[in-house]
Image: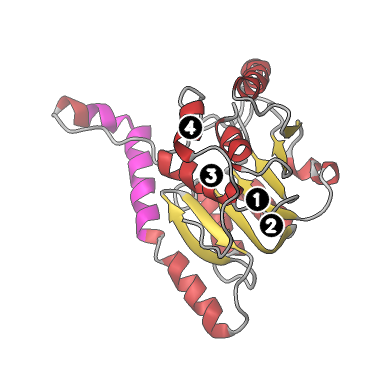
Amino acid sequence: MIDSNTKPNDGPDLVATMAAVADVDGWMSPGQGATLFDAASRCPDGGTIVEIGSFRGRSTIVLAQAAASNVRIFAIDPHAGNDRGPQEIDGFVDEAADDHAVFLANLERAGVADRVTHVRAFSDDAHDRIDGGIDVLYVDGAHRYGPALADIRSWGDRVLDGGTMLIHDSFSSIGVTGAIMRSLVAGRRFRYVGRSRSMTIYRADLPSGLGARLRNASRQLAQLPWFAKNVGLKVLLTLKLGAVLQRVGRPAPEWPY
């Protein structure tokens, strides 16, 4: 649901792209895949796309297949066995090598290995590996408050005027939501465009003036009831109450996107 006056570049259609990632592990709903596809397809010729947090390449493939052939694509992920996914914060060193190998194999199988530069480093150590400004930034790295805030601030500062920043697990993860509240709700640069489930879309074109900032803040604060619902669902799942619901004939809630 990116709003732009530019037209998407010619390239694979969304249906073919989503089919290419159907069997790739990751946390991305079809609507979120469409949102990433749209953002990448609107990246200007010769532009730069940066992804923070690639896991096994699901979102990376979508970005690479949607973007024009002369767009630079960087995927930042240390594949160090930490921040792998929901409730997988640390202690997965044994899986790290496998994640890295599967990531590379998935990109090769999708035909985009030569399009993507993988930066195997933590995001705060990767700035000097990528030169220039960023046209499309996708943040799906560590979801704890501190790292999420650092990614949004430091990498967000590199997004060019008019560029796009997408953030996964917004108004779903407590850490990511806290970082958004701190850095973007009352910010002066990024306009809140909307969201696809927990993937928020920001554009670096917020008009100047108090009125524009207040409207931008109110649109983001309006998402807090949905955030409260997501936190409640996660509590239920953490307490194993989903199985109780199933036993009484109610569907167990899915871990929120």
Q: State the residue position of label 2.
A: 156
Callout 2–callout 4 Cβ contact below 8 Å: no
On the picture, is 237 further left or further right than 181? Answer: left
Amino acid tagged 3: Phe
On the picture, is 29 further left or further right than 158? Answer: left
Query: Would you call the spot at circle 1 few (<14 residues within 10 Å), some (14-19), or many (20 or more)?
Result: many
Label 1 and label 4: CA atoms lie apart by: 23 Å
Query: Would you call the spot at circle 2 few (<14 residues within 10 Å), some (14-19), or many (20 or more)?
Result: many
Mark on residue 37? 3
Does 59 appear above or below 176? Answer: above
Front disc: 2 or 4: 4
Residue extent of the magenta highlight: 225-244
Q: N-terminal of the two: label 3 or label 1?
A: 3
Q: N-terminal of the two: label 3 or label 4?
A: 4
**Where is residue 59, by image quadrant?**
top right
Amino acid tagged 1: Leu
Query: Would you call the spot at circle 4 few (<14 residues within 10 Å), some (14-19), or many (20 or more)?
Result: few
Does 71 appear above or below 22? Answer: below
Q: State the residue position of label 4.
A: 16
Amino acid tagged 4: Ala
Front disc: 2 or 1: 1
Callout 2–callout 1 Cβ contact below 8 Å: yes
**Where is residue 237, by image quadrant?**
top left
Label 2 and label 4: CA atoms lie apart by: 30 Å
Q: Secondary structure at mark 2?
A: helix
Q: N-terminal of the two: label 1 or label 4?
A: 4
